[in-house]
Image (cartoon, helix red, strand yellow):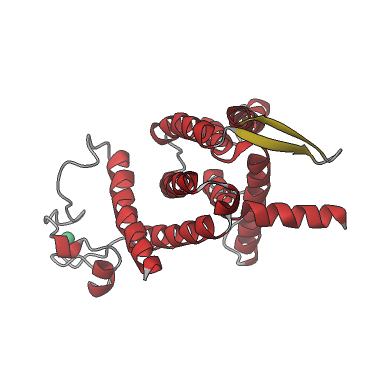
Amino acid sequence: MMLILIFALGAIIGSFLNVVILRTHSGAVSWLKGRSHCMYCHHRLEWYDLVPILSFVSLRGQCRYCSKAISWQYALVEASTGLLFVLVYTFSIGTMTLDVPTGDALLMLVRNLLVVCVMVILFVYDFRWQLIPDRFTLPAILFFLIFNSFLYTSAVICNPATALCYTIAGWTNYVLGAILGGGFFLIQYVISKGKWIGGGDIRLGVLMGVILGLSGTAIALFVSYMVGALWGMSLILAGKKKMGSAIPFGTFLSIGTVIVLLWLPQITGLIQYYLLV
Ligand SMILES: [Zn+2]
């Protein structure tokens, strides 16, 4: 029952994220002001046209007033956000609370849900328009850096080569993560003179750093490249894209960030297992 509520909450927030994404792209002044209209006939939409997922299904993907097809994006974003909320809730309650006091566990759950919201926005935006807007990344960088520095006052960093571990201040961990994530793309940006990646990827790298910390960012970059490589290969195998054609990389970075956010302990365990074997 709890999971259904969490899914519904995620779907409602996903519906709001759709509004944020579209209104930002169309240059609207406010995310909150103004009623929703059909994109084609401009008919004002009633509350029963705006129920996440259910309206889309009951209308069979068409506008009630002009019967034009509604973009799959709306229902997909609503369903994915709902699903991600359920995953974050399950994993935050399940594995992460063990070493964190209860009050902090709640804060961590809230933080993880916020990360999901930001990543959904960046994923859709980069996928549709090959853009990672500073309007989202810059405030998010500041917010998560401060939030995480308060939430985690210290961090343990281990050197995989020597297996020596050090305790450092929490904020140092996130600043180091930001330097790694941002620097990784800054170097590529400088070498390729901005051809391989855009400036938005650098900011997204910094954002990953302040969300995941140093080792989390390193693993997330690796996971993002794996997901990107798998996606690229499946496209080539399906004969849809030629080698080297552009796939917006920010989409993979946002996927990698969410994967590491959810399963960092499991992934770290896997890596250690294979390093030991
Ligand atoms: Zn319409």
- Residue 43 occupies quadrant: bottom left
Of residue 103 and residue 28, the one placed in the foreground of this image is: 103
Q: Is residue 63 above or below residue 21?
A: below
Q: Position of residue 170 (x, y in %)?
A: 60, 31
Of residue 5 and residue 43, the one placed in the foreground of this image is: 5
Q: Position of residue 95 (x, y in %)?
A: 58, 57
Q: Is residue 121 left or right of residue 171?
A: left
Q: Is residue 140 left or right of residue 75?
A: right
Of residue 20 and residue 22, the one placed in the foreground of this image is: 20
Q: Quadrant of the N terminus?
A: bottom left
- Residue 236 occupies quadrant: bottom right
- Residue 62 occupies quadrant: bottom left
Q: Which residue occupies 54% across, 51% down? A: 258
Q: Position of residue 172 (x, y in %)?
A: 62, 27
Of residue 161 and residue 89, the one placed in the foreground of this image is: 89
Q: Which residue occupies 68% across, 27% down? A: 191
Ligand 1, what quadrant?
A: bottom left
Say how many tags the image has.
0
